[in-house]
Amino acid sequence: MHHHFIFHKPYGYLSQFVNNQNKRKNKRLIGELHDFPEGVMAIGRLDENSEGLLLLTTDGKKSEHIRSKKVEKEYYALVDGVINDDAIEALQKGIIIGVNGEEYTTKPCRAFHVHSLTEYPIEDRKVRDERHGPKSWVGIVLTEGKFRQVRKMTAAVGFPTLRLVRVRIGNVKLELPAGVVKEVDDFDA
């Protein structure tokens, strides 16, 4: 029998259970936040500076399906500046980013202005002082997941990401407060 978990990964944690690298000696790991059963794995990753929805499972086939291009992943990015319609359109069409030292053109995606965060339990966390200029939120829905892709995409259109929150994977939406884990029978992803 497999175990499946829905988790709101907080900012500042690695999507890992075991620290197997000396350079990460003082890093916080998600395994510290809950007593997960042996064999559980994160489905995809969120880097240390990203937060939001993370699914975990002991089922490798389930993990492979959810990581596939068949399942949408939705992110909210707080960006430096007030993102404009031209930047949104460029994100939607696909843009060139760097992946493993080579140019990569992202697949077309959905991108949109986010005017309210009330649909999701996103903590009001200060990212920087208002004296450094305006900020705005943009939503991006992808079916691919290259290393730091959303951050690279927003930077490529002139609006670097200051904060990144994954709010949806397939039909599973972010509903839990940061740091909370919920075991479920299965994912509807």
Image (cartoon, helix red, strand yellow):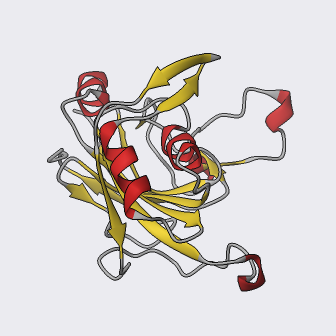
* 95 over 85 or under it: above or below: above
Total marks in image: 0
88 or 100: nearer the viewer: 88
- Where is residue 97 drawn, in percent x and y? 54, 30
- Left or right, 29 with respect to 168, comes to right
- Left or right, 63 with respect to 149, comes to left
Query: What residue occupies the far front of the structure in this picture?
Result: 86
* 138 over 67 or under it: above or below: below
- Which quadrant of the figure contains the N terminus? top left
Name the residue: 76% across, 76% down: 132
- Quarter of the image for residue 63 reads top left
- Left or right, 109 with respect to 77, comes to left
* 86 over 120 or under it: above or below: above
- Where is residue 156 drawn, in percent x and y? 56, 42
* 77 over 54 or under it: above or below: below
Name the residue: 39% across, 45% down: 90
- Quarter of the image for residue 14 reads top right
Name the residue: 27% across, 26% down: 68
182 or 139: nearer the viewer: 139
- Where is residue 29 drawn, in percent x and y? 65, 47
- Where is residue 100 drawn, in percent x and y? 61, 17
Query: Does the rendering let one see residue 20?
Result: yes
- Which quadrant of the figure contains the C terminus? top left
3 or 132: nearer the viewer: 132
Name the residue: 18% across, 49% down: 185
- Left or right, 123 with respect to 21, comes to left
Query: Does the rendering let one see residue 181?
Result: no
